[in-house]
Image (spheres, grey):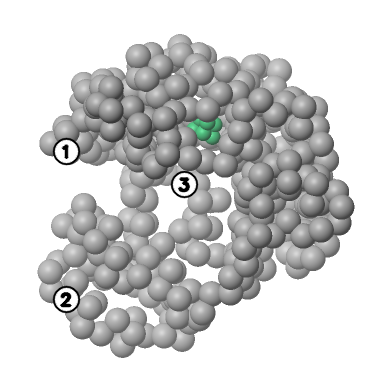
Amino acid sequence: MTSSLYIHIPFCAAKCNYCSFNSCVGLESLQERYVKVVCSELLQGSARSEQEGLTTVFLGGGTPTLLSTSLLKQILSMCFSSFIISKDTEISIEANPGTVDRDKLTSLLENGVNRLSIGVQSFNDQELKTIGRIHSASEAIKIVETAKEVGFNNLSLDLMYGLPGQSAKSWQTSLEVAVSLGVKHLSLYQLTVEEQTPLESLIRRETLQLPEDNEIEVMDEITAECTAAAGFSQYEISNYAQLGYQSRHNMTYWENRDYFGVGAGAVSCINGTRRKNIANPERYCCLLETGQSTVIEEETLEFDASFRETVIMGLRLNRGVSLPILEKRYGILLEKYYGKVLQQLFTDGMLEKKAGFLRLSDKGRPFANRVMAELV
Ligand code: SF4
Protein backbone atom coordinates (compact mmCIF):
# COMPACT_ATOMS: atom_id res chain seq x y z
CA MET A 1 0.00 0.00 0.00
CA THR A 2 1.28 3.49 -0.86
CA SER A 3 0.44 5.82 1.95
CA SER A 4 2.56 8.82 1.02
CA LEU A 5 2.28 11.09 -1.96
CA TYR A 6 4.97 13.54 -3.09
CA ILE A 7 4.29 16.22 -5.71
CA HIS A 8 7.23 18.08 -7.20
CA ILE A 9 6.86 21.70 -8.28
CA PRO A 10 10.12 22.64 -10.00
CA PHE A 11 9.70 26.41 -10.34
CA CYS A 12 11.74 29.00 -8.41
CA ALA A 13 11.88 32.79 -8.47
CA ALA A 14 15.71 32.72 -8.56
CA LYS A 15 18.32 30.01 -8.30
CA CYS A 16 20.10 29.95 -4.93
CA ASN A 17 23.82 29.56 -5.50
CA TYR A 18 24.13 26.31 -3.50
CA CYS A 19 21.13 24.60 -5.10
CA SER A 20 21.38 21.27 -6.89
CA PHE A 21 17.67 20.44 -6.71
CA ASN A 22 15.52 19.98 -9.76
CA SER A 23 14.37 23.57 -10.03
CA CYS A 24 14.30 26.16 -12.75
CA VAL A 25 13.67 29.87 -13.12
CA GLY A 26 11.94 31.83 -15.86
CA LEU A 27 9.40 29.16 -16.79
CA GLU A 28 6.32 31.06 -15.60
CA SER A 29 4.61 30.43 -18.94
CA LEU A 30 4.82 26.67 -18.31
CA GLN A 31 3.17 26.70 -14.88
CA GLU A 32 -0.44 26.36 -15.96
CA ARG A 33 0.38 23.54 -18.38
CA TYR A 34 2.55 21.83 -15.77
CA VAL A 35 -0.24 21.85 -13.18
CA LYS A 36 -2.67 20.37 -15.69
CA VAL A 37 -0.23 17.57 -16.45
CA VAL A 38 0.51 16.95 -12.75
CA CYS A 39 -3.25 16.61 -12.20
CA SER A 40 -3.46 14.03 -14.98
CA GLU A 41 -0.54 12.07 -13.46
CA LEU A 42 -2.31 12.18 -10.08
CA LEU A 43 -5.45 10.82 -11.69
CA GLN A 44 -3.57 8.02 -13.46
CA GLY A 45 -1.69 7.16 -10.27
CA SER A 46 -4.83 6.98 -8.17
CA ALA A 47 -6.42 4.63 -10.68
CA ARG A 48 -3.42 2.29 -10.38
CA SER A 49 -2.94 2.39 -6.62
CA GLU A 50 -4.72 0.40 -3.97
CA GLN A 51 -6.94 2.95 -2.29
CA GLU A 52 -6.38 2.56 1.41
CA GLY A 53 -5.97 6.21 2.20
CA LEU A 54 -3.02 8.55 2.29
CA THR A 55 -1.30 9.31 5.56
CA THR A 56 0.81 12.10 4.04
CA VAL A 57 0.88 14.43 1.06
CA PHE A 58 3.89 16.66 0.45
CA LEU A 59 4.20 19.43 -2.12
CA GLY A 60 7.92 20.10 -2.49
CA GLY A 61 10.22 21.79 -4.91
CA GLY A 62 11.50 24.05 -6.23
CA THR A 63 9.12 26.51 -4.66
CA PRO A 64 5.53 25.22 -4.68
CA THR A 65 4.27 28.52 -3.28
CA LEU A 66 5.48 30.30 -6.41
CA LEU A 67 2.36 28.90 -8.08
CA SER A 68 -0.73 31.08 -7.98
CA THR A 69 -3.44 30.40 -5.43
CA SER A 70 -5.68 29.07 -8.16
CA LEU A 71 -3.06 26.61 -9.50
CA LEU A 72 -2.28 25.35 -5.99
CA LYS A 73 -6.01 24.89 -5.44
CA GLN A 74 -6.26 22.77 -8.61
CA ILE A 75 -3.55 20.40 -7.38
CA LEU A 76 -5.04 20.09 -3.91
CA SER A 77 -8.55 19.53 -5.31
CA MET A 78 -7.21 16.77 -7.54
CA CYS A 79 -5.53 15.11 -4.55
CA PHE A 80 -8.78 15.16 -2.60
CA SER A 81 -10.89 13.89 -5.49
CA SER A 82 -8.47 11.12 -6.54
CA PHE A 83 -7.18 9.76 -3.23
CA ILE A 84 -8.68 8.87 0.11
CA ILE A 85 -7.58 11.67 2.41
CA SER A 86 -8.80 11.89 5.97
CA LYS A 87 -8.70 14.71 8.48
CA ASP A 88 -5.62 13.01 9.97
CA THR A 89 -3.66 13.09 6.72
CA GLU A 90 -0.59 15.31 7.05
CA ILE A 91 -0.64 17.69 4.08
CA SER A 92 2.55 19.74 3.85
CA ILE A 93 3.82 22.35 1.47
CA GLU A 94 7.25 23.92 1.17
CA ALA A 95 6.84 27.68 1.34
CA ASN A 96 9.51 30.25 0.65
CA PRO A 97 9.44 33.76 2.07
CA GLY A 98 8.89 36.21 -0.76
CA THR A 99 6.39 33.92 -2.50
CA VAL A 100 3.47 33.80 -0.04
CA ASP A 101 1.18 36.35 1.50
CA ARG A 102 -1.80 36.24 3.84
CA ASP A 103 -4.29 35.45 1.06
CA LYS A 104 -2.26 32.54 -0.30
CA LEU A 105 -1.70 31.14 3.18
CA THR A 106 -5.41 31.41 3.96
CA SER A 107 -6.30 29.64 0.73
CA LEU A 108 -3.79 26.84 1.41
CA LEU A 109 -5.31 26.28 4.84
CA GLU A 110 -8.85 26.34 3.47
CA ASN A 111 -7.86 23.82 0.81
CA GLY A 112 -6.53 21.26 3.23
CA VAL A 113 -2.85 22.10 3.82
CA ASN A 114 -2.15 21.61 7.52
CA ARG A 115 1.65 21.86 7.69
CA LEU A 116 4.01 24.49 6.33
CA SER A 117 7.69 23.85 5.84
CA ILE A 118 9.26 27.26 5.45
CA GLY A 119 12.66 27.60 3.78
CA VAL A 120 14.28 30.29 5.87
CA GLN A 121 17.93 29.07 5.88
CA SER A 122 19.20 31.97 8.00
CA PHE A 123 17.95 34.96 9.95
CA ASN A 124 21.04 36.96 8.96
CA ASP A 125 20.56 39.21 5.92
CA GLN A 126 24.21 39.09 4.85
CA GLU A 127 24.22 35.27 4.92
CA LEU A 128 20.96 35.16 2.94
CA LYS A 129 22.52 37.43 0.32
CA THR A 130 25.69 35.33 0.16
CA ILE A 131 23.75 32.17 -0.66
CA GLY A 132 21.44 33.91 -3.11
CA ARG A 133 18.13 33.75 -1.26
CA ILE A 134 15.48 36.18 -2.51
CA HIS A 135 14.17 37.20 0.92
CA SER A 136 15.30 39.01 4.04
CA ALA A 137 15.25 37.79 7.64
CA SER A 138 12.37 40.13 8.47
CA GLU A 139 10.30 38.76 5.57
CA ALA A 140 10.87 35.25 6.92
CA ILE A 141 9.73 36.29 10.39
CA LYS A 142 6.68 37.95 8.87
CA ILE A 143 5.65 34.76 7.04
CA VAL A 144 5.81 32.72 10.23
CA GLU A 145 3.75 35.29 12.12
CA THR A 146 1.18 35.57 9.32
CA ALA A 147 0.92 31.78 9.02
CA LYS A 148 0.17 31.55 12.73
CA GLU A 149 -2.39 34.35 12.50
CA VAL A 150 -4.30 32.66 9.68
CA GLY A 151 -4.45 29.45 11.69
CA PHE A 152 -1.45 27.24 10.86
CA ASN A 153 -0.31 25.40 13.96
CA ASN A 154 2.13 22.90 12.46
CA LEU A 155 5.06 24.99 11.23
CA SER A 156 8.54 23.83 10.36
CA LEU A 157 11.57 25.95 9.51
CA ASP A 158 14.59 24.91 7.44
CA LEU A 159 17.85 26.51 8.51
CA MET A 160 21.41 25.91 7.33
CA TYR A 161 24.69 26.16 9.17
CA GLY A 162 28.26 26.10 7.95
CA LEU A 163 27.45 28.93 5.53
CA PRO A 164 30.24 31.04 4.03
CA GLY A 165 31.16 33.80 6.46
CA GLN A 166 28.88 32.42 9.18
CA SER A 167 30.14 32.56 12.75
CA ALA A 168 29.02 30.38 15.65
CA LYS A 169 27.49 33.48 17.21
CA SER A 170 25.48 34.22 14.10
CA TRP A 171 24.25 30.60 13.94
CA GLN A 172 23.18 30.87 17.55
CA THR A 173 21.24 34.06 16.78
CA SER A 174 19.45 32.40 13.84
CA LEU A 175 18.52 29.45 16.01
CA GLU A 176 17.33 31.69 18.84
CA VAL A 177 15.11 33.64 16.48
CA ALA A 178 13.73 30.35 15.08
CA VAL A 179 12.80 28.91 18.47
CA SER A 180 11.39 32.24 19.65
CA LEU A 181 8.83 32.08 16.82
CA GLY A 182 7.05 29.14 18.46
CA VAL A 183 7.36 26.71 15.54
CA LYS A 184 6.94 22.98 16.11
CA HIS A 185 9.67 21.53 13.90
CA LEU A 186 13.18 22.46 12.77
CA SER A 187 15.23 20.97 9.94
CA LEU A 188 18.83 22.03 10.53
CA TYR A 189 21.19 21.10 7.73
CA GLN A 190 24.88 21.62 7.41
CA LEU A 191 25.55 23.26 4.04
CA THR A 192 26.75 20.77 1.44
CA VAL A 193 28.73 22.33 -1.38
CA GLU A 194 27.45 20.53 -4.45
CA GLU A 195 29.50 20.15 -7.59
CA GLN A 196 28.82 22.48 -10.49
CA THR A 197 26.99 25.04 -8.42
CA PRO A 198 27.96 28.73 -8.41
CA LEU A 199 28.80 28.35 -4.73
CA GLU A 200 31.32 25.63 -5.49
CA SER A 201 33.18 27.85 -7.93
CA LEU A 202 33.12 30.81 -5.51
CA ILE A 203 34.68 28.60 -2.84
CA ARG A 204 37.19 27.07 -5.25
CA ARG A 205 38.30 30.58 -6.28
CA GLU A 206 38.45 31.51 -2.57
CA THR A 207 35.98 34.35 -3.08
CA LEU A 208 33.98 32.78 -0.25
CA GLN A 209 35.24 30.73 2.66
CA LEU A 210 33.48 28.09 4.69
CA PRO A 211 33.81 27.93 8.47
CA GLU A 212 36.60 25.66 9.77
CA ASP A 213 35.79 22.20 11.18
CA ASN A 214 36.29 23.38 14.76
CA GLU A 215 33.75 26.16 14.20
CA ILE A 216 31.28 23.60 12.84
CA GLU A 217 31.78 21.56 16.01
CA VAL A 218 30.90 24.61 18.09
CA MET A 219 27.81 25.16 15.90
CA ASP A 220 26.79 21.53 16.53
CA GLU A 221 27.10 22.11 20.28
CA ILE A 222 25.03 25.29 20.02
CA THR A 223 22.39 23.36 18.07
CA ALA A 224 22.14 20.69 20.73
CA GLU A 225 21.92 23.22 23.58
CA CYS A 226 19.54 25.64 21.93
CA THR A 227 17.07 23.04 20.64
CA ALA A 228 17.00 21.11 23.92
CA ALA A 229 16.47 24.30 25.94
CA ALA A 230 13.47 25.15 23.73
CA GLY A 231 11.88 21.71 24.19
CA PHE A 232 12.81 20.21 20.81
CA SER A 233 13.92 16.58 20.59
CA GLN A 234 16.31 15.49 17.90
CA TYR A 235 14.68 12.53 16.18
CA GLU A 236 16.79 12.34 13.02
CA ILE A 237 20.29 13.45 12.08
CA SER A 238 19.06 16.88 10.91
CA ASN A 239 15.55 17.09 12.35
CA TYR A 240 14.13 18.31 15.64
CA ALA A 241 10.52 18.41 16.80
CA GLN A 242 8.26 19.33 19.66
CA LEU A 243 6.40 16.32 21.03
CA GLY A 244 4.02 14.92 18.42
CA TYR A 245 5.29 17.09 15.56
CA GLN A 246 7.78 14.85 13.77
CA SER A 247 7.47 15.00 9.99
CA ARG A 248 5.27 12.02 9.17
CA HIS A 249 6.04 12.36 5.48
CA ASN A 250 9.79 12.14 5.97
CA MET A 251 9.31 9.18 8.32
CA THR A 252 8.08 7.31 5.23
CA TYR A 253 11.53 7.76 3.66
CA TRP A 254 13.48 6.99 6.81
CA GLU A 255 11.45 3.85 7.41
CA ASN A 256 11.92 2.95 3.75
CA ARG A 257 8.20 2.54 3.12
CA ASP A 258 6.43 2.95 -0.22
CA TYR A 259 5.68 6.36 -1.66
CA PHE A 260 4.25 7.70 -4.87
CA GLY A 261 6.00 10.65 -6.55
CA VAL A 262 4.36 12.89 -9.13
CA GLY A 263 5.92 15.64 -11.24
CA ALA A 264 9.17 16.32 -13.06
CA GLY A 265 12.07 14.38 -11.53
CA ALA A 266 9.84 12.83 -8.86
CA VAL A 267 10.70 9.36 -7.59
CA SER A 268 8.23 6.64 -6.62
CA CYS A 269 9.03 3.50 -4.69
CA ILE A 270 6.26 0.93 -4.81
CA ASN A 271 6.49 -2.78 -4.02
CA GLY A 272 10.28 -2.81 -4.31
CA THR A 273 10.43 -0.98 -7.64
CA ARG A 274 11.83 2.52 -7.82
CA ARG A 275 10.87 4.75 -10.74
CA LYS A 276 12.11 8.21 -11.57
CA ASN A 277 10.32 10.71 -13.79
CA ILE A 278 12.16 12.76 -16.38
CA ALA A 279 13.56 15.89 -14.69
CA ASN A 280 13.02 18.46 -17.42
CA PRO A 281 9.59 20.06 -16.75
CA GLU A 282 8.92 20.81 -20.40
CA ARG A 283 9.78 17.28 -21.54
CA TYR A 284 7.71 15.89 -18.67
CA CYS A 285 4.69 17.87 -19.92
CA CYS A 286 5.21 16.80 -23.55
CA LEU A 287 5.49 13.12 -22.63
CA LEU A 288 2.32 13.06 -20.55
CA GLU A 289 0.40 15.15 -23.07
CA THR A 290 1.23 12.66 -25.82
CA GLY A 291 0.36 9.64 -23.69
CA GLN A 292 3.96 8.50 -23.24
CA SER A 293 5.68 7.30 -20.11
CA THR A 294 7.53 9.90 -18.07
CA VAL A 295 9.68 7.27 -16.34
CA ILE A 296 13.35 7.51 -17.30
CA GLU A 297 14.82 5.20 -14.67
CA GLU A 298 13.37 2.02 -13.24
CA GLU A 299 15.08 -0.26 -10.80
CA THR A 300 13.79 -3.24 -8.90
CA LEU A 301 15.71 -3.55 -5.69
CA GLU A 302 17.03 -6.97 -4.80
CA PHE A 303 15.54 -8.25 -1.57
CA ASP A 304 18.73 -7.93 0.47
CA ALA A 305 19.58 -4.51 -1.07
CA SER A 306 16.20 -3.34 0.19
CA PHE A 307 17.00 -4.84 3.61
CA ARG A 308 20.32 -2.98 3.79
CA GLU A 309 18.69 0.25 2.68
CA THR A 310 16.06 -0.09 5.43
CA VAL A 311 18.83 -0.54 8.00
CA ILE A 312 20.80 2.47 6.77
CA MET A 313 17.81 4.77 6.50
CA GLY A 314 16.57 3.66 9.93
CA LEU A 315 19.91 4.49 11.50
CA ARG A 316 19.34 8.13 10.56
CA LEU A 317 16.62 8.13 13.22
CA ASN A 318 17.67 8.65 16.82
CA ARG A 319 15.49 5.76 17.94
CA GLY A 320 17.07 3.59 15.18
CA VAL A 321 15.58 0.77 13.18
CA SER A 322 13.00 -1.55 14.72
CA LEU A 323 14.41 -5.07 14.90
CA PRO A 324 11.04 -6.88 15.12
CA ILE A 325 9.69 -4.94 12.11
CA LEU A 326 12.89 -5.60 10.18
CA GLU A 327 12.65 -9.31 10.88
CA LYS A 328 8.96 -9.46 10.05
CA ARG A 329 9.42 -7.54 6.80
CA TYR A 330 12.48 -9.41 5.52
CA GLY A 331 12.75 -12.59 7.57
CA ILE A 332 16.46 -11.84 7.94
CA LEU A 333 18.35 -11.91 11.23
CA LEU A 334 20.53 -8.83 11.51
CA GLU A 335 23.44 -10.50 13.34
CA LYS A 336 23.52 -13.39 10.94
CA TYR A 337 23.39 -11.16 7.89
CA TYR A 338 26.14 -8.70 8.86
CA GLY A 339 28.23 -11.12 10.97
CA LYS A 340 31.63 -9.76 12.04
CA VAL A 341 31.09 -6.28 10.57
CA LEU A 342 28.19 -5.67 12.94
CA GLN A 343 29.99 -7.27 15.85
CA GLN A 344 32.95 -4.92 15.36
CA LEU A 345 30.66 -1.87 15.31
CA PHE A 346 29.16 -3.03 18.64
CA THR A 347 32.64 -3.64 20.05
CA ASP A 348 33.78 -0.17 18.93
CA GLY A 349 30.73 1.31 20.67
CA MET A 350 29.35 2.80 17.44
CA LEU A 351 26.03 0.94 17.59
CA GLU A 352 23.76 -0.18 20.38
CA LYS A 353 20.46 -1.98 20.86
CA LYS A 354 17.77 -0.36 22.92
CA ALA A 355 14.13 -1.39 23.44
CA GLY A 356 14.05 -3.50 20.30
CA PHE A 357 15.80 -0.92 18.10
CA LEU A 358 19.27 -0.89 16.59
CA ARG A 359 20.65 2.63 16.72
CA LEU A 360 23.77 4.75 16.58
CA SER A 361 25.23 5.30 20.04
CA ASP A 362 26.16 8.80 21.23
CA LYS A 363 29.73 7.87 20.35
CA GLY A 364 28.72 6.60 16.92
CA ARG A 365 26.46 9.49 15.87
CA PRO A 366 29.29 11.83 14.77
CA PHE A 367 30.59 8.94 12.64
CA ALA A 368 27.20 8.11 11.13
CA ASN A 369 28.50 8.18 7.55
CA ARG A 370 31.33 5.78 8.36
CA VAL A 371 29.03 3.35 10.18
CA MET A 372 26.50 3.42 7.37
CA ALA A 373 29.22 2.83 4.79
CA GLU A 374 30.10 -0.40 6.62
CA LEU A 375 26.50 -1.62 6.52
CA VAL A 376 25.43 -0.50 3.07
S1 SF4 B 1 14.45 27.97 -3.36
FE1 SF4 B 1 15.14 25.85 -2.96
S2 SF4 B 1 14.81 24.74 -4.85
FE2 SF4 B 1 14.68 26.94 -5.34
S3 SF4 B 1 16.73 27.49 -6.02
FE3 SF4 B 1 16.63 27.91 -3.82
S4 SF4 B 1 17.35 26.03 -2.82
FE4 SF4 B 1 16.88 25.54 -4.96
Q: Position of residue 272 (x, y in %)?
A: 59, 73
Task: Determine contact: label 3, label 2, CB under 8 Å.
Answer: no
- Count neighbours of disc 1 (C-alpha within 10 A) and say few if under 14, some if 14 to 19, many if 20 or more: few
Sequence-wise, which precedes: disc 1 or disc 2?
A: 1
Residue at (64, 17) in percent of width and height: 101
**What residue sits right under mark 1 in the picture?**
213
Q: Amino acid at mark 2?
A: Gln
Q: In what quadrant of the picture does the N terminus appear?
A: bottom right
Q: CA distance from mark 1 to mark 2?
A: 28 Å
> Of helix, strand and loop, which one carries label 3?
loop
Q: Closer to us: mark 1 or mark 2?
A: 1
- Between residues 162 and 53, which one lies in front from this camera angle? 162
**What residue sits right under mark 3 in the picture?**
246
The image quarter containing residue 352 is bottom left
Q: Closer to us: mark 3 or mark 1?
A: 1
- Count neighbours of disc 3 (C-alpha within 10 A) and say few if under 14, some if 14 to 19, many if 20 or more: many
Residue at (60, 23) in percent of width and height: 13
Q: CA distance from mark 3 to mark 1?
A: 29 Å
- Count neighbours of disc 2 (C-alpha within 10 A) and say few if under 14, some if 14 to 19, many if 20 or more: few
> Of helix, strand and loop, which one carries label 2?
helix
Residue at (70, 22) in percent of width and height: 104
Q: Amino acid at mark 3?
A: Gln
Sequence-wise, which precedes: disc 3 or disc 1?
A: 1
In the image: residue 127, left or right of residue 260: left
Q: Is mark 1 within 8 Å of ligand 1?
A: no
Q: Amino acid at mark 1?
A: Asp
Residue at (52, 41) in percent of width and height: 21
In the image: residue 341, left or right of residue 129: left
Q: Closer to us: mark 3 or mark 2?
A: 2
**What residue sits right under mark 2 in the picture?**
344
Question: Is any atom of residue 373 visible in this view?
Answer: yes
